[in-house]
Image (spheres, rainbow, N blue to C red):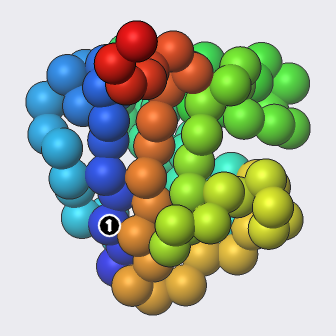
Amino acid sequence: MQLECRFFGPFRDDVGEQTVSWNPDGDTVGDLLRELEATYPILEGRLVDDAGTNLAGKTVVTKNKTDVRHLGGLETELEDGDVFRLVPSVYGGAV
């Protein structure tokens, strides 16, 4: 299975790439986010909360443009070709 992860704002700066292709070991969004945190330690605790049950803070993760909180949250199943957008909790447009 191959996915695409697009990082925005500080996440993009921290990862050093805007987009990465990913072959996940797990089957759910939670698995994917934990894999990303393990691969990019600077993201640790910024994608998944300390309990490992929800997104961290107000981080927004979309699967094919739909917020995963409106799907199954961290239990949302991964599918080949999915595109994920990861937006940090403090990132916005012009004031």
> Pointer 1: residues within 10 angstroms few (<14), some, or many (20+)?
some
Q: Quadrant of the C terminus?
A: top left
Q: Which sits in the foreground, 8 or 5?
A: 8
In the rendering, at what x and y percent does residue 54 appear?
Answer: 81, 37
Residue to which mark 1 is pinned: 4
- The quadrant where residue 42 appears: top left
Q: Residue at x 51, y 15 (%)?
A: 90
Name the quadrant containing residue 10. Answer: top left
Residue closest to the eye, 92 or 17: 92
**Left or right of 14, for residue 28:** right
Q: Amino acid at mark 1?
A: Glu
In the image: residue 2, left or right of residue 55 = left
Residue furthest left as drawn? 16
Q: Is residue 54 left or right of residue 21?
A: right
Q: Residue at x 14, y 39 (%)?
A: 17
Q: Is residue 25 in view from this perspective? A: no
Q: Residue at x 41, y 70 (%)?
A: 83
Is residue 6 something one can see in this rendering? Answer: yes
